[in-house]
Amino acid sequence: MQKYLNIFDFNQKVDYKNEILAGLTVAMTMIPESLMFAILAGFSPLVGLYGAFIMGLVTAIFGGRPGLISGGAGATVVVLMALMNSHGLEYVFAAVALAGVFQLIVGFLKLGKFIRLVPQPVMFGFVNGLAIIIFMAQMDQFKIGVGDAAVWLTGSTLYTMVGLVLFTIAIIVFVPKLTKAVPASLIGIIVVFLVVYFLKIETKQVVDIINQDTLPGEELKSLSGSLPSFHIPTIPFTLEAFKIILPYGLIMAAVGLTEGLLTLNLVDEITNTKGNSNRECLAQGGANILNGFFGGMGGCPMIAQTLVNLSAGSRARLSGIIAALTILLIILFGAPVIELVPIAALVGVMVMVSVGTFEWASFKALRRMPRSDIFVMILVTLITVVLHNLALAVLIGVIISALVFAWESAKRIRARKYVDENGVKHYEIYGPLFFGSTTLFNEKFDVQGDPSEVIIDFKESRVSDMSGIEALNKITERYAQVGKKVHLRHLSNDCIRLLAAADDIIDVNVMEDPTYKVMVNKPLSKSKDDDPETKNPFKLWGL
C-alpha cells in the first residue's frame, strides 16, 4: 500500500485549507481564460470548460509534480484554429486525441528528460515573454467585441473597469500584510464581486465574454451543462482524414510538451523540489486522449494558473483536483453565479500574476551574462511575444545556444607537441574532437616534417562523434601515404566503441596502445552482444 501512496504523492503532508482555497482561486482564474480561448477558436463555451475539467483532473492526479495546473491553454488551442475553420469540430477532437497518443509515446520512451537541454537564457526569455503575453492578454478585456471588430471601452465604462482592476490589485498587494490565512487573489475576487453585486455597478462580467459574439435575436449562451459524455469523433476512417489531422496532432503535442515541461522546470525552481518529466508527458497524453473522446478542446499546463496556485500556498495535488471539480460543479450547478463575476477582478489577479512571473533577476544577470546569452534571451522573449509560439521560440533559442556552444568548444582544441629521446613525435590533444573542431585538429599536424613514428595522445581529449572518427581516418591516411606509422593512445572506452563500430571508415591496423591494449586486430574485451551499454544507443552516445 505504501508503494501506491508514494506513486500518487498522497503520503505527503497536506495543508487542506490552503489546498482547497488555492483550488477555488485557480478555478476562478481558469474559467474565463478557457472560455476566451474556446470562443476565439470558434468552439462552444462548454467545450472549453470540459477541456479544463478533464485536463485539470487527470494531470492533477497523475501528472509529473504537485502544484502544476493544466487546462485549455491558448498555446495549444491556437494550433487548432485553422483546423476548426477548415474542417470543423469533429476533426479538432480527432487531432486532440492523436496529440495525446504522440505525448504518450514520448512519455513511454522517457524522452522528457531532454528538457534538461534548455539553457537558462532560454528559460529567462520564455518566462519573460510569457509574462508579457499574460499582461497583454488582459488588455483585450478593456475592449468590447470580437477580433478586428473589437473597440476600446470609453467614458465611465472604462473608468469603472480601471478602478475595479486597481481595487483588486490593491487587495492582492495589501491583504498579505494583514493575513495569509486566505489567498489574497481569492479575497480580491470575492470582495470585488460583492461590491459590484450589491452596489449594482455596471461593468463587464463573465457572461459578457460568453455572449460577446452572439447576434441580436439569438439565444444567449450559458455555462450550464451536463457531465461530458463519451463520443467518438465522426470523421472518415481513411488515410486522407489521417493526413489532415496528423500535422495538427504533431504540432499540438510538441507545443503542449514544450510548454508543460518548461513550466514543470519553473515550478521545480520555485519550490526547490524535483518533478518527473516523463510522468508529466504520460499524464498530458492520457488527458488529451480523453478530451478527444469526451468533447474537450485539450490543452497543457498553464503557467499563469500554476503561479496563482503556488502563490496561494499550494504544494500538493489536492488544489488541482479541487480546481477541476469546481469547474465541473459550476457546469452542473453554479453557472448563474459564476457568470456574474466581474472581469475586472480576474484581470487584476492576472496582472499581478504577470508581474510575479517576470524574471526581474534577469536584468541583474545581464551584467554577468555573455553577449550570446543576452542575445538568446532577448530573441526568445521577442519571438514568444510577437508570434505567441512558445515551442518555436524555445526551439530557436536552444538551436542558437547549441551552435554557440559548439563554436566555443571547437576553438578549445589544442595540441602539445614534443619529440622524445627515441625520436618519436608526440601530439598530446586537449579538448573535444567533434564536428566543429575537426578542421583545427587536422591543422595541428605536420605530416611531411614529422619523423617516421608518431603518437597521438587523447588522455585529455575525447572523440565525440562520427566526424571525429572521420578526422582520425584522414590524419592516419595522410601519414600512411608517406610511409609513417601512427599510434593512438589513451582513448576512452566510449571512443573505442565508436572506432570499433566504424572499422569500415578507419583503418584499425594503424592503432596501437600498449598501455591500454586498445588493440590491433583484436576484439574488444566484451562483445557488443554481451555489453549492456552497447545495446542501448542512448548509453553508447553518453546520453
Image: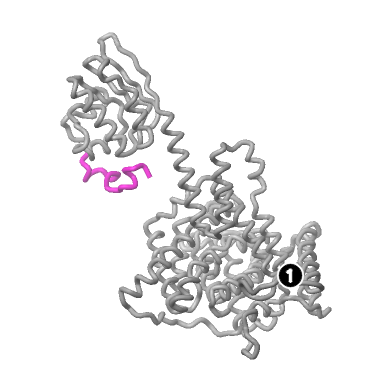
Residue 144 point in image, percent of width and height: 69, 74
Q: Is residue 43 above or below residue 500?
A: below
Residue at (44, 79) in percent of width and height: 90
Instruction: Determine which quarter of the picture holds residue 501.
Output: top left
Q: Residue under circle 1?
A: 344
Give the extent of the magenta segment: 526-543
Q: Is residue 507 above or below residue 127?
A: above
Q: Is residue 106 above or below residue 481?
A: below
Instruction: Determine which quarter of the picture holds residue 513.
Output: top left
Q: In this view, which residue lies farthest toward the top? A: 421
Q: Is residue 535 shown in magenta?
A: yes
Residue 331 point in image, percent of width and height: 60, 81
Residue 262 point in image, percent of width and height: 53, 54
Q: How many marks?
A: 1
Color style of the picture: one colour
Q: Nearer the viewer, residue 351 or 383?
A: 383
| Quadrant of the rendering where the C terminus is positioned | top left
Q: Is residue 443 above or below residue 184?
A: above
Instruction: Determine which quarter of the picture holds residue 504.
Output: top left
Quick check: 51 left or right of 460? right
Mark 1 surroundings within 10 Å by alpha-carbon count, few (fewer than 14), some (14 through 19), many (20 or more): many
Residue 156 visible (yes or no): yes
